[in-house]
Amino acid sequence: MDREVLFYTTEEVSEKFRVHRKTIGVWQKQGLLPAIKTPGGGRWRYPKKEVDELWLERQRSREFPSR
């Protein structure tokens, strides 16, 4: 059974936007990307819906958040 992906990893988001992983952390701190921390491991996960919406918005405007 295929499971729908609900969250992206930091690496997946950075690949999607073609930016460095650290840039994703900056965007998160700026409030551009909501994120949750995984239990125990402390790794960040980004909701697929919000990431995809931001990506589409940025593709339309061809603007990306600055660091």
Image (spheres, grey):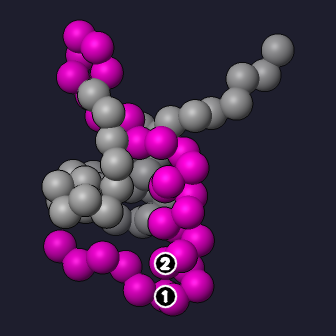
Q: From this viewpoint, is residue 20 visible?
A: no
The residue where tag 1 is placed is 62
Q: State the image coordinates of residue 54 (x, y, percent, origin top left).
A: 48, 66
Residue that appears at 56% across and 58% down? 52
Q: State the image coordinates of residue 61 (x, y, percent, origin top left).
A: 51, 89
What amino acid type is highlighted by mark number 1? Arg
Residue 15 located within the stretch drawn in magenta: no
Q: In this view of the protein, which residue sits in the foreground, 65 or 16?
A: 65
Give residue 52's mark: none
Q: Secondary structure at mark 2?
A: helix
Where, by quadrant of the figure, is residue 41 drawn?
Answer: top left
Q: From this viewpoint, is residue 46 visible?
A: yes
User: Do tag 2 and tag 1 residues touch (Cβ < 8 Å)?
Assistant: yes
Q: State the image coordinates of residue 32 (x, y, percent, origin top left).
A: 31, 63
User: Could you tell whether 49 is left or right of 32 in the image?
Assistant: right
Q: In this view of the protein, which residue sits in the foreground, 41 or 35?
A: 35
Residue that appears at 49% across and 55% down? 51
Above or below: residue 54 compared with residue 2? below
Quadrant of the rendering where the C terminus is positioned: bottom left
Residue that appears at 58% across and 34% down? 6
Where, by quadrant of the figure, is residue 5 drawn?
Answer: top right
The residue where tag 2 is placed is 58
Q: Which residues are magenta?
A: 38-67
Residue 65 located within the stretch drawn in magenta: yes
Q: State the image coordinates of residue 37 (x, y, percent, origin top left).
A: 27, 28
Say how many tags the image has: 2
